[in-house]
Image (cartoon, rainbow, N blue to C red):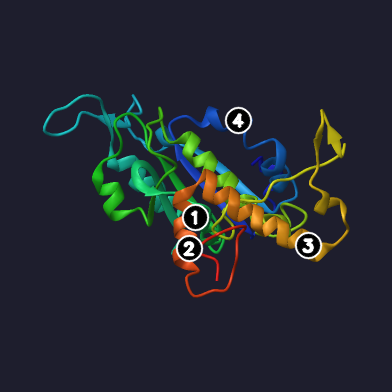
Protein backbone atom coordinates (compact mmCIF):
# COMPACT_ATOMS: atom_id res chain seq x y z
CA UNK A 1 0.00 0.00 0.00
CA UNK A 2 1.38 3.38 -0.93
CA UNK A 3 2.15 6.03 1.67
CA UNK A 4 -0.52 8.45 0.45
CA UNK A 5 -3.28 5.94 1.21
CA UNK A 6 -2.34 5.31 4.84
CA UNK A 7 -3.91 8.37 6.44
CA UNK A 8 -5.55 7.51 9.75
CA UNK A 9 -6.65 4.07 8.60
CA UNK A 10 -7.71 1.87 11.53
CA UNK A 11 -9.32 -1.06 9.68
CA UNK A 12 -8.04 -4.46 8.58
CA UNK A 13 -4.27 -4.60 8.09
CA UNK A 14 -1.94 -7.24 6.66
CA UNK A 15 1.85 -7.18 6.95
CA UNK A 16 4.02 -9.61 5.00
CA UNK A 17 7.60 -10.51 5.84
CA UNK A 18 9.46 -11.82 2.79
CA UNK A 19 12.83 -12.04 1.04
CA UNK A 20 11.17 -11.30 -2.30
CA UNK A 21 8.97 -8.18 -2.04
CA UNK A 22 9.08 -7.73 -5.81
CA UNK A 23 6.90 -10.80 -6.26
CA UNK A 24 3.98 -8.94 -4.67
CA UNK A 25 4.10 -6.07 -7.16
CA UNK A 26 1.19 -6.53 -9.53
CA UNK A 27 -0.92 -9.24 -7.89
CA UNK A 28 -1.82 -7.02 -4.92
CA UNK A 29 -2.30 -3.88 -7.02
CA UNK A 30 -4.91 -5.14 -9.47
CA UNK A 31 -8.44 -6.55 -9.48
CA UNK A 32 -10.39 -6.88 -6.23
CA UNK A 33 -7.37 -6.65 -3.89
CA UNK A 34 -6.11 -3.46 -5.53
CA UNK A 35 -9.55 -1.87 -5.38
CA UNK A 36 -9.98 -2.87 -1.74
CA UNK A 37 -6.79 -1.00 -0.90
CA UNK A 38 -7.72 2.05 -2.91
CA UNK A 39 -11.08 2.14 -1.14
CA UNK A 40 -9.22 1.77 2.18
CA UNK A 41 -11.03 -1.40 3.18
CA UNK A 42 -7.65 -3.01 3.88
CA UNK A 43 -4.04 -1.88 4.07
CA UNK A 44 -1.25 -4.23 3.02
CA UNK A 45 2.45 -3.69 3.69
CA UNK A 46 5.28 -5.80 2.29
CA UNK A 47 8.50 -5.88 4.34
CA UNK A 48 11.90 -7.08 3.16
CA UNK A 49 13.37 -9.42 5.77
CA UNK A 50 16.85 -8.07 5.00
CA UNK A 51 15.81 -4.72 6.46
CA UNK A 52 15.87 -6.38 9.88
CA UNK A 53 19.50 -7.53 9.71
CA UNK A 54 22.48 -5.61 11.11
CA UNK A 55 25.57 -6.93 9.34
CA UNK A 56 26.97 -5.37 6.19
CA UNK A 57 25.98 -8.38 4.08
CA UNK A 58 22.36 -8.33 5.36
CA UNK A 59 22.59 -12.04 6.14
CA UNK A 60 19.26 -13.81 6.60
CA UNK A 61 20.25 -17.47 6.24
CA UNK A 62 22.76 -20.02 7.48
CA UNK A 63 23.53 -23.74 7.22
CA UNK A 64 21.42 -26.14 9.30
CA UNK A 65 22.89 -27.70 12.42
CA UNK A 66 23.47 -31.41 11.89
CA UNK A 67 24.24 -30.97 8.22
CA UNK A 68 22.04 -31.39 5.19
CA UNK A 69 21.40 -29.56 1.94
CA UNK A 70 20.38 -25.94 1.52
CA UNK A 71 20.11 -23.02 3.89
CA UNK A 72 17.66 -22.02 6.62
CA UNK A 73 16.29 -18.59 7.45
CA UNK A 74 17.87 -17.37 10.67
CA UNK A 75 15.63 -16.59 13.63
CA UNK A 76 17.11 -13.18 14.57
CA UNK A 77 15.71 -10.98 11.76
CA UNK A 78 12.33 -12.71 11.87
CA UNK A 79 11.99 -12.27 15.62
CA UNK A 80 13.03 -8.62 15.36
CA UNK A 81 10.55 -7.93 12.58
CA UNK A 82 7.64 -9.63 14.32
CA UNK A 83 8.40 -7.89 17.61
CA UNK A 84 8.40 -4.54 15.82
CA UNK A 85 5.30 -5.07 13.67
CA UNK A 86 3.00 -7.17 15.86
CA UNK A 87 0.72 -6.11 18.68
CA UNK A 88 -1.07 -8.21 21.28
CA UNK A 89 -3.99 -8.72 18.89
CA UNK A 90 -1.94 -9.61 15.78
CA UNK A 91 -2.40 -13.08 14.31
CA UNK A 92 1.02 -14.30 13.13
CA UNK A 93 0.93 -16.77 10.25
CA UNK A 94 3.82 -18.87 8.96
CA UNK A 95 3.40 -20.41 5.51
CA UNK A 96 5.12 -23.76 5.22
CA UNK A 97 4.67 -27.08 3.36
CA UNK A 98 4.43 -28.71 6.80
CA UNK A 99 1.51 -26.55 7.89
CA UNK A 100 -2.19 -27.31 8.20
CA UNK A 101 -3.97 -27.44 4.84
CA UNK A 102 -5.50 -24.01 4.28
CA UNK A 103 -9.25 -23.96 3.62
CA UNK A 104 -12.11 -21.51 3.11
CA UNK A 105 -13.06 -22.00 6.75
CA UNK A 106 -9.65 -20.66 7.76
CA UNK A 107 -10.13 -17.65 5.47
CA UNK A 108 -13.46 -16.81 7.11
CA UNK A 109 -11.96 -17.16 10.58
CA UNK A 110 -8.98 -14.93 9.76
CA UNK A 111 -11.32 -12.09 8.84
CA UNK A 112 -12.20 -11.88 12.53
CA UNK A 113 -8.73 -10.55 13.35
CA UNK A 114 -7.88 -6.91 12.71
CA UNK A 115 -4.25 -7.58 11.86
CA UNK A 116 -2.47 -10.45 10.14
CA UNK A 117 1.29 -10.79 9.91
CA UNK A 118 2.42 -13.40 7.38
CA UNK A 119 5.94 -14.86 7.47
CA UNK A 120 7.11 -16.25 4.13
CA UNK A 121 9.55 -19.13 4.29
CA UNK A 122 12.37 -19.58 1.77
CA UNK A 123 15.21 -21.93 0.89
CA UNK A 124 14.93 -25.09 3.05
CA UNK A 125 12.62 -23.35 5.52
CA UNK A 126 12.91 -21.38 8.74
CA UNK A 127 14.52 -22.04 12.10
CA UNK A 128 12.04 -24.14 14.13
CA UNK A 129 12.09 -21.58 16.93
CA UNK A 130 10.09 -19.25 14.64
CA UNK A 131 7.28 -21.79 14.48
CA UNK A 132 7.43 -22.55 18.21
CA UNK A 133 7.64 -19.01 19.57
CA UNK A 134 6.11 -16.70 16.97
CA UNK A 135 3.55 -18.47 14.79
CA UNK A 136 -0.08 -18.58 15.86
CA UNK A 137 -0.97 -20.49 12.69
CA UNK A 138 1.10 -22.52 10.20
CA UNK A 139 -0.59 -23.03 6.84
CA UNK A 140 0.14 -24.96 3.66
CA UNK A 141 -1.86 -24.28 0.48
CA UNK A 142 -1.32 -27.79 -0.88
CA UNK A 143 0.77 -30.93 -0.92
CA UNK A 144 3.55 -29.58 -3.09
CA UNK A 145 6.65 -27.44 -2.65
CA UNK A 146 7.09 -23.93 -4.04
CA UNK A 147 10.24 -21.82 -4.38
CA UNK A 148 9.30 -19.64 -1.41
CA UNK A 149 6.31 -18.51 0.64
CA UNK A 150 5.34 -15.48 -1.44
CA UNK A 151 2.71 -17.24 -3.54
CA UNK A 152 1.05 -18.95 -0.54
CA UNK A 153 0.98 -15.58 1.23
CA UNK A 154 -0.76 -14.02 -1.78
CA UNK A 155 -3.31 -16.84 -1.80
CA UNK A 156 -4.11 -16.25 1.86
CA UNK A 157 -4.32 -12.48 1.36
CA UNK A 158 -6.64 -12.82 -1.63
CA UNK A 159 -8.90 -15.34 0.08
CA UNK A 160 -9.23 -13.21 3.23
CA UNK A 161 -9.54 -9.72 1.73
CA UNK A 162 -12.36 -10.68 -0.63
CA UNK A 163 -14.40 -11.76 2.41
CA UNK A 164 -14.08 -8.42 4.18
CA UNK A 165 -17.29 -6.33 4.32
CA UNK A 166 -17.87 -4.28 1.20
CA UNK A 167 -14.97 -5.69 -0.82
CA UNK A 168 -17.08 -7.77 -3.22
CA UNK A 169 -19.87 -5.21 -3.39
CA UNK A 170 -22.48 -7.88 -2.70
CA UNK A 171 -21.56 -9.65 0.54
CA UNK A 172 -23.90 -12.52 -0.34
CA UNK A 173 -21.58 -13.47 -3.21
CA UNK A 174 -19.02 -14.87 -0.79
CA UNK A 175 -21.67 -16.76 1.16
CA UNK A 176 -22.79 -18.77 -1.90
CA UNK A 177 -19.37 -19.63 -3.31
CA UNK A 178 -17.74 -23.03 -3.37
CA UNK A 179 -16.71 -24.32 0.08
CA UNK A 180 -18.74 -21.64 1.89
CA UNK A 181 -21.22 -24.29 3.01
CA UNK A 182 -18.87 -27.23 2.85
CA UNK A 183 -19.78 -28.17 -0.73
CA UNK A 184 -18.92 -26.98 -4.22
CA UNK A 185 -20.92 -24.24 -5.87
CA UNK A 186 -23.71 -25.03 -8.32
CA UNK A 187 -23.09 -24.58 -12.11
CA UNK A 188 -23.71 -21.19 -13.68
CA UNK A 189 -25.14 -20.25 -17.08
CA UNK A 190 -25.60 -16.98 -18.97
CA UNK A 191 -26.75 -15.86 -22.43
CA UNK A 192 -27.23 -17.25 -25.02
CA UNK A 193 -29.82 -19.75 -23.81
CA UNK A 194 -28.65 -22.18 -26.52
CA UNK A 195 -25.01 -22.34 -27.59
CA UNK A 196 -23.77 -24.93 -30.09
CA UNK A 197 -26.87 -27.03 -29.42
CA UNK A 198 -26.24 -26.93 -25.67
CA UNK A 199 -29.25 -25.52 -23.86
CA UNK A 200 -29.43 -23.90 -20.44
CA UNK A 201 -31.48 -26.03 -18.01
CA UNK A 202 -35.12 -25.05 -18.37
CA UNK A 203 -35.61 -24.51 -14.65
CA UNK A 204 -33.24 -21.51 -14.76
CA UNK A 205 -35.49 -19.87 -17.35
CA UNK A 206 -38.72 -20.63 -15.48
CA UNK A 207 -38.76 -17.67 -13.11
CA UNK A 208 -39.73 -20.07 -10.32
CA UNK A 209 -37.26 -19.05 -7.61
CA UNK A 210 -38.16 -21.92 -5.32
CA UNK A 211 -37.51 -24.47 -8.05
CA UNK A 212 -34.29 -22.70 -9.02
CA UNK A 213 -32.99 -22.78 -5.45
CA UNK A 214 -33.83 -26.48 -5.17
CA UNK A 215 -32.08 -27.23 -8.48
CA UNK A 216 -29.01 -25.28 -7.45
CA UNK A 217 -28.75 -27.13 -4.16
CA UNK A 218 -29.17 -30.51 -5.83
CA UNK A 219 -26.56 -29.64 -8.46
CA UNK A 220 -24.13 -28.46 -5.77
CA UNK A 221 -24.55 -31.82 -4.02
CA UNK A 222 -24.14 -33.74 -7.29
CA UNK A 223 -21.02 -31.81 -8.26
CA UNK A 224 -19.45 -32.28 -4.85
CA UNK A 225 -20.18 -36.02 -4.87
CA UNK A 226 -18.76 -36.38 -8.39
CA UNK A 227 -15.74 -34.06 -8.30
CA UNK A 228 -14.81 -34.00 -4.62
CA UNK A 229 -15.94 -37.19 -2.86
CA UNK A 230 -13.80 -36.25 0.12
CA UNK A 231 -15.82 -33.05 0.62
CA UNK A 232 -19.05 -34.96 0.05
CA UNK A 233 -18.28 -37.48 2.78
CA UNK A 234 -17.35 -34.66 5.14
CA UNK A 235 -20.61 -32.89 4.28
CA UNK A 236 -22.56 -36.07 5.03
CA UNK A 237 -20.83 -36.45 8.36
CA UNK A 238 -21.48 -32.81 9.34
CA UNK A 239 -25.14 -32.96 8.34
CA UNK A 240 -25.95 -36.46 9.49
CA UNK A 241 -28.82 -35.25 11.67
CA UNK A 242 -30.10 -32.63 9.23
CA UNK A 243 -32.92 -33.11 6.77
CA UNK A 244 -31.60 -32.53 3.29
CA UNK A 245 -31.77 -34.30 -0.04
CA UNK A 246 -29.71 -34.57 -3.15
CA UNK A 247 -30.79 -35.93 -6.55
CA UNK A 248 -31.08 -39.70 -6.28
CA UNK A 249 -28.97 -39.81 -3.14
CA UNK A 250 -29.35 -42.99 -1.17
CA UNK A 251 -28.38 -41.06 1.95
CA UNK A 252 -31.21 -38.55 1.59
CA UNK A 253 -33.57 -38.32 4.52
Q: Position of residue 187 (x, y in %)?
A: 69, 46
| Residue 9 in sight in this render | no
Q: Which residue is mark 4?
A: 25
Q: Which residue is mark 3?
A: 211
Q: Which residue is mark 2?
A: 236
Q: Which element type, helix, strand or loop, lies under badge 4?
A: loop
Q: Position of residue 117 (x, y in %)?
A: 47, 50
User: Residue 77 sits in which quadrant?
Assistant: top left
User: Residue 145 sits in which quadrant?
Assistant: top left
Q: Distance between the Cα atoms at labels 3 and 4?
A: 46 Å
Residue at the left extreme of this rendering: 66
Which mark sits nearer the N-terminus, 4 or 1? 4
* Left or right side of 31 for 94: left
Q: Position of residue 89 (x, y in %)?
A: 47, 64
**Circle 3 crowding by C-alpha within 10 Å: few under 14, some 14–19, many from 20:** few
| Residue 12 in sight in this render | yes
* Left or right side of 13 for 198: right
Q: Residue at x 60, y 60 (%)?
A: 246
Q: Residue at x 73, y 52 (%)?
A: 168
Determine whether label 2 and label 4 are within 8 Å by CB.
no
Task: Judge whether 217 appears above or below 33 on screen.
Answer: below
Q: Nearer the viewer, residue 187 or 197?
A: 197
Amino acid sequence: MSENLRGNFTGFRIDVLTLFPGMFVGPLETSIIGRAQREQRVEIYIHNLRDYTHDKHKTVDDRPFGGGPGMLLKPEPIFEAVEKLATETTRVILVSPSGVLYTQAHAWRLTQYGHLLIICGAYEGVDERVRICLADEVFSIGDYVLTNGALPAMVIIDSVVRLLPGVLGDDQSAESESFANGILEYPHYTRPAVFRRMAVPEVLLSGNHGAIQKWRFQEAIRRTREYRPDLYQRFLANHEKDKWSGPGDKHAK
